[in-house]
Image (cartoon, grey):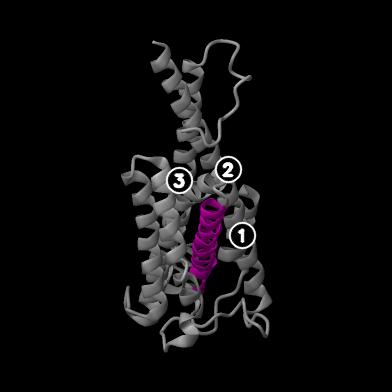
Amino acid sequence: MAAAFAVGIYMALITSPADFKQGESVRIMYIHVPSAWMALLTYTIIAVASGVSIIWRHPLADLAAKSAAPVGLAFTGLALITGSLWGKPMWGDWWVWDARLTSVLVLFFLYLGYIAIWQAIEDQNQASRAAAILALVGFVNVPIIKFSVEWWSTLHQPASVIRLDGPTIDGSMLVPLLVMVLAFKAYFITVLLWRMKAELVARKLQVLRLKKAQGA
Amino acid sequence: MVEFFNMDGYGVFIWPSYVIVFVVLIGLGIQSRKWLANLEKAVQDLQPEGDAESEGPQIGEP
């Protein structure tokens, strides 16, 4: 993971060229796009895990969704902040109520709501069910984010990598971008596993405390 | 070097972006590791000696 980040940052800041239209500001793309993609991927994982949790009541699915949420929230926040820092020099404003930006802001609030449910409801089974329902209902926002730049007239540029007719971005920019995406994915998997393990240990701790209280 | 940091005038937008991303990612990573370590220590303190390996995490227990 560290190696992927090191190589990705080196390529993003040093070896990749400036854009002919956006100049050096395009270097923000190498952290903005992976953050945004990971925000969507993480929410999709949460929605799938929530579906599995509701249908098959698999406790590990529940745990995976709960553990992924703070990481997804961080990615979404970073996508919004870096987008704002990129938007100011390109669009002349820190924020515009553009379909893409607004739908990503909605995603940010969905993450906050999902985490708040887990925090607010004491009964973990009830919390799991309520959070899973929110995750599934909120999943409708994911395709809206993806296709917002095609469905509405927006300031945000259209997709240039994931397209049916292939990427329109030059290889000298695509390679560093993909290296950074790989680094972000490795980071996500690492932190997700730590947080899932922590959730498992927390449940074990709860059982041990209960046993101790009953034994005393 | 000044030219590199200036980034054609976009440095004031580029560098804060990178700093914020890495502060948040490293911060979340450290918080997650610390949380896990604290929980593991708490379990170790509660568990009777020699029982540490015998009882794995109980998924789904209330």
Q: Is residue A204 above or below residue A114?
A: above
Among numbered discs 2 and 1, the one appearing first in the sequence: 1
Q: Amino acid at mark 1?
A: Gly
For the point 62% across and 73% down, the residue is A173
Circles 1 and 3 in contact, beta carbons < 8 Å: no
Badge 2: few (under 14), some or many (20 or more) residues near its Cα, within 10 Å?
Answer: some
Looking at the picture, do discs 2 and 3 lie on one chain? no
**Which residue has dot 2 on it?**
A193
**Which residue has dot 3 on it?**
B28
SS state under label 3: helix
Image quarter for residue A164? Answer: bottom right
For the point 51% across and 70% down, the residue is A29
Badge 3: few (under 14), some or many (20 or more) residues near its Cα, within 10 Å?
Answer: some
User: Which one is closest to the eye, mark 2 or mark 3?
Assistant: 2
**Which residue has dot 1 on it?**
A8
For the point 55% across and 64% down, the residue is A13
Residue A129 x/y as whole percent: 43, 51
User: Which one is closest to the eye, mark 1 or mark 3?
Assistant: 3
Residue at mark 2 to residue at mark 1: CA–CA distance: 23 Å
Q: Is residue A189 left or right of residue A199?
A: right
Q: Is residue A65 visible?
A: yes
The dot on residue A132 is none
SS state under label 2: helix
SS state under label 1: helix
- Extent of the magenta region: A26-55
**Residue B61 versus residue A2: which sits nearer the camera?**
B61
Circles 2 and 1 in contact, beta carbons < 8 Å: no
Q: On what subunit does the disc labeled 3 rest?
A: B
Badge 1: few (under 14), some or many (20 or more) residues near its Cα, within 10 Å?
Answer: many
Residue B22 x/y as whole percent: 47, 52
Q: Is residue B12 visible?
A: no
